Image (tube, rainbow, N blue to C red):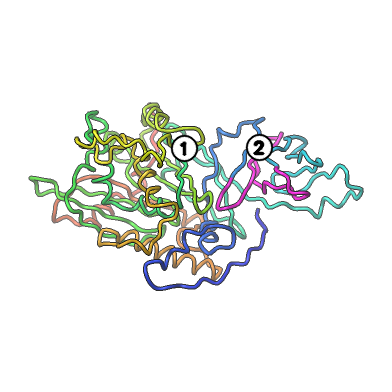
Amino acid sequence: MNDTTIAVPVRMKTRGPDRYQYLTQTGPGTPAGELLRSYWQPVAMIESLPSGAAPQPVRLLGEDLVLFRDDQDRVGLIDRKCAHRCTDLALGRIEDGGIRCPYHGWLFDVNGRCLEQPAEASPTAKDRIKMKSYPLHEAAGVFWAYLGRGEPPLFPNYPALQGGPEHCYVTRWLGECNWLQASEGNIDPVHTSFLHQLELTDPQMKARWGVFSNQARPELSIVDTCFGVRLYTRRAIADTDRLSVRVTNFVMPNACAVGGFEGYLGEGGLTMLWDVPIDDEHHYRWEFIFHRSGKLDKESLERQYSAEKAEGDRMWRRQEELYSQNRASMQGKAYAGLGECFSVHDIAITQAQGVVHQQANEHLSSTDIAIVRARRMLDEAVDDVMAGRDPRGVVRSPDQNDFRDMVVVTGEMGAAESKEEYCAKHAVPSLFAVQESV
């Protein structure tokens, strides 16, 4: 585990629209950086590091690390710079129970301990060397890392991370902007009726995303939960006395739980997104698409995403070319002219806010209540971390590791029905209980 001591600076709270600008800074020792380090963060796909694979460089929260699997199949995440003369361990040799620096042969294990110094006269000098290292956890086909201080919390039993590979499709995108604006885009329920509006012909796609074509003014409300913020979005359905309702969630500190494939597979689906800082100007958008039935059309998803990706999990669409926007398609119902992949829509539009969105330039409205609350909740959580307390959503005991109230549903309800009761009847273990596919 990490035993590095970091002095967290005193944070000055300011008034005005840029009060939360400090949340965009995530390097070691920054208040927001220490907050994000208090939670498990996705690092790399497990399949990207098979036995015998080369070491994998990782940049995470402004830190340069190396992920490697040793010759005994143990996996480590340690400092990328050798403790001797700071050369790059991504060039290292995998042998003798660790990773060996190619410069002078120093050997380090998955916990960052120095096992050998071949040219050193003292046989005990190596025992004084300890590299920075971080604990790892494997879930949903991904390596997760805990970069915080002290004992890591329990890994959260979020519904999207349960079941086998047939229940969850995982992908990653490079976002060339700050993590916060990307995360806030995920909890903005109004943009779905504009940015994501498409003319859908495929019945399955229409069943999945038809709710987004409803541009009726939404009724928005929020409520705090143990893990973050629950969002209720209700819209009138034309020519009826019914309302469409979506229940989604902000999950502390950089995740969300939103709709999945319940449109054509029935209830029991959700997508969880993590916007994980690489540094203050780049992030990875991790997508975990889950359905309890085990009947996800993963081949279709793979085709759609692969068609939009270039090397390194980047979009092939470039900002300097206005993301190859198709203006002609906007004459129909392709609202943004950016194709049919919602991930592309989200990444392009948040990058268009600038590399680091300047909050002082924005004019928030009544539809931004979830974003305002999320910023305040992050601010409160930073205070907790600076005071040595666990922030909201960090789990230490098994009896608290229960997220059945992380309800994600899309449906209809009567205008007089209570949204709280509608949500409560779905807050049961069976909502996301994994079913064995036949």
Please provide percent x and percent y for residue 3. Answer: 67, 58
Q: In terms of depth relative to the viewer, which is nearer, 431 or 212? A: 212
Q: Residues within 10 Å of mark 2 (few under 14, many from 20)?
A: many
Residue that carries the numbered disc 2 in the rendered image? 55
In x, y percent, where is residue 179?
A: 45, 52
Asked whether residue 164 is drawn in magenta, I would say no
| Residue 405 visible (yes or no) | no
The residue under label 1 is which amino acid type?
Arg
Q: Position of residue 361 (x, y in %)?
A: 35, 62
The amino acid beneath tag 2 is Pro
Q: Which residue is mark 1?
A: 314
Mark 2–mark 1 distance (CA, rounded to whole Å): 21 Å
Q: Which residues are magenta?
A: 59-88
Above or below: residue 371 compared with residue 347: below
Q: Residue at x 54, y 44 (%)?
A: 43
Q: Quadrant of residue 148?
A: bottom right
